[in-house]
């Protein structure tokens, strides 16, 4: 064979691969036990007859999926929401219920100066400037509109705003019950009132395209029993206008996440519910969606090794230890990082010590810990009459711990953290009034920043740099918005902003 013919065949082979498989190998794709990777040509999966049809089909019933459902239905579309688990809500319903909002009245009432520009700057700094700026900017600019939309559904928030790590100022609204369930439940009520069906135990196995490459519908297993992908009845559902993917991230997919980051083995716990796996992401990549930053996986620095999953101790660490108290290395009794740095900086610092850190707060610093009694009952947070007793429990050098607290108290008095330049709250109080409380910290896999490339209209972008007709995505399944690190409370904002956009545009696709 001539050299010219060989090169021509190679070109044809590459084009055929990109057309039929979506370039899945570019992402190092493997789906674990869910399904094998096989090429798909346009139109090859079209059924002879659709079992059902809706204008808009949505995969996922968390913040983004429900926002999309509400908007699409209100725009006049017939809508079906598919959820693979037995209950709706995904990770959203166990989310901490904090919502980043820039330049709001709550901040003004507390004398806090903020703006969408500052929020965007914080997002880019944490994201190591890997963020797709056009998308991150939309999250910041539409944050106020997004939270007001949830209020229109009846979601209630606490009066004050809280300060989460990586943010320059306090800007995070907290739901009345400090849980994402407060948002999800109101979304579910609205969805029900609109007559939108949420079909549980519905596992997506294929995204179906027509002969022109437009997304036409989905193949699912109805009455699926997680995690057995062989269960359920096969159905083909047509999406006349569009399909919206709002399936979340893959923090609980131990196989796939370890492919992206080999250090995140099955020995590393996750905060996510077990259904947070990669199969929908992989199916979109298989039909030609462009992968973005899939190996960027975030660990939460505030989780406790003394309980499984998200647990309860994270509230103490996030709302008391990091904000009102200090975090120390138990071997030295010293602080070792800015407790309000972004999640990656704190997680990396804790991991570098090789053992869990300990956060400490006093009786005046625990006001924001709504579940303190539960955490004390579980033994995740512990209570002590003196700092000496606390030091003895965690084998911390007592004198060094006392010196660390005294030094911190002097910084509070002077209004400046001389060691790590941590932000001082408007009413920052010293650690001096017993009883004292403590909790251990050890990072767990929390959020996957990477996912599908989308544009400002929530359209999924293909490997040909053009939108895949009839396909939209929102929430954690979409990549690029947060870059290397997502700031706490920006996920809810992201999901609501782009979920609404996806629903609005899918309805008129």
Image: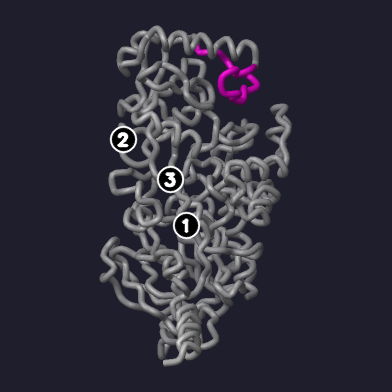
**CA–CA distance between discs 2 and 1?**
28 Å
What label sits on residue 446 in the rendered view?
3
Residue ID at (32%, 33%): 305
- Magenta region, residue range: 416-431
Q: How crowded is mark 3: few (under 14 residues within 10 Å), some or many (20 or more)?
A: many
What x and y, as percent, mark residue 261? 39, 51
Seen from the viewer's position, the closer of residues 405 and 144 is 405
What secondary structure do most residues of the magenta stretch adopt? loop
Which residue, given by chain and number where applicable, does mark 2 sit on? 307
In-image side of 496 versus 270 (left or right): right
Point out the image quarter for the N terminus: bottom left
Q: Residues within 10 Å of mark 2 (few under 14, many from 20)?
A: some
What x and y, as percent, mark residue 371? 42, 30
Q: Which residue lies furthest to the front in this view?
A: 2
Q: Earlier in the sequence, mark 3 or mark 1?
A: 1
What label sits on residue 164 in the rendered view?
none
**CA–CA distance between discs 3 and 1?**
14 Å
Reply yes or no: does residue 425 show up in magenta: yes
Seen from the viewer's position, the closer of residues 298 and 374 is 298
What label sits on residue 294 in the rendered view?
1
Q: Earlier in the sequence, mark 2 or mark 1?
A: 1
Q: Is residue 204 above or below residue 140?
A: below
Reply yes or no: does residue 317 show up in magenta: no
């Amino acid at each position: 064979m001539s050299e010219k013919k060989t090169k021509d065949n190679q070109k044809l082979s590459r084009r055929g691969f990109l057309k039929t498989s979506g370039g899945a190998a570019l992402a190092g794709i493997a789906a674990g036990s869910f399904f094998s990777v096989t090429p798909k040509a346009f139109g090859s999966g079209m059924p002879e007859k659709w079992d059902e049809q809706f204008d808009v089909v949505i995969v996922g019933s968390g913040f983004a999926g429900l926002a999309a459902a509400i908007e699409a239905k209100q725009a006049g579309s017939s809508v079906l929401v598919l959820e693979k688990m037995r209950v709706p809500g995904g990770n959203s319903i166990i989310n901490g219920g904090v919502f980043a909002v820039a330049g709001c009245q709550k901040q003004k009432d507390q004398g806090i100066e903020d703006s969408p520009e500052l929020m965007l700057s914080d997002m880019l700094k944490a994201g190591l400037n890997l963020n797709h700026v056009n998308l991150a900017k939309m999250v910041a600019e539409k944050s106020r509109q997004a939270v007001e939309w949830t209020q229109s559904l009846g979601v209630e928030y606490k009066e004050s705003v809280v300060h989460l790590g990586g943010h320059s100022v306090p800007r995070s609204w907290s739901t009345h019950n400090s849980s994402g369930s407060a948002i999800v439940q109101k979304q579910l009520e609205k969805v029900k009132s609109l007559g939108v069906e949420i079909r549980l135990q519905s596992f997506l196995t294929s995204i179906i395209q027509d002969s022109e490459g437009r997304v036409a519908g989905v193949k699912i297993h109805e009455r699926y029993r997680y995690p057995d992908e062989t269960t359920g009845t096969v159905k083909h559902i047509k999406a006349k206008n569009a399909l919206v993917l709002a399936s979340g991230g893959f923090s609980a997919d131990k196989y796939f996440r370890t492919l992206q980051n080999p250090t995140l083995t099955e020995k590393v716990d996750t905060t996510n519910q077990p259904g947070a796996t990669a199969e929908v992401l992989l199916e979109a990549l298989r039909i030609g969606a462009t992968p973005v930053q899939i190996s960027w996986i975030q660990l939460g620095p505030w989780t406790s090794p003394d309980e499984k999953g998200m647990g309860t101790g994270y509230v103490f660490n996030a709302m008391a230890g990091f904000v009102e108290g200090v975090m120390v290395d138990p071997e030295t009794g010293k602080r070792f990082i800015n407790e309000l740095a972004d999640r990656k900086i704190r997680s990396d610092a804790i991991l570098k010590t090789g053992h869990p850190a300990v956060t400490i707060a006093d009786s005046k610093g625990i006001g924001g810990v709504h579940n303190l009694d539960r955490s004390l009952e579980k033994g995740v947070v512990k209570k002590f009459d003196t700092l000496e007793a606390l030091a003895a429990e965690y084998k911390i050098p007592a004198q060094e711990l006392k010196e660390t607290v005294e030094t911190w108290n002097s910084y509070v008095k002077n209004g400046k953290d001389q060691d790590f330049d941590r932000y001082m709250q408007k009413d920052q109080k010293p650690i001096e009034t017993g009883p004292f409380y403590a909790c251990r910290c050890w990072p767990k896999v929390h959020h996957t920043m990477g996912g599908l490339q989308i544009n400002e209209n929530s359209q999924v972008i293909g490997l040909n740099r053009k939108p895949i007709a009839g396909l939209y995505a929102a929430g954690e399944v979409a990549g690029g918005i947060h870059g290397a690190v997502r700031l706490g409370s920006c996920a809810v904002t992201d999901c609501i902003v782009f979920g609404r956009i996806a629903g609005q545009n899918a309805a008129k696709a």
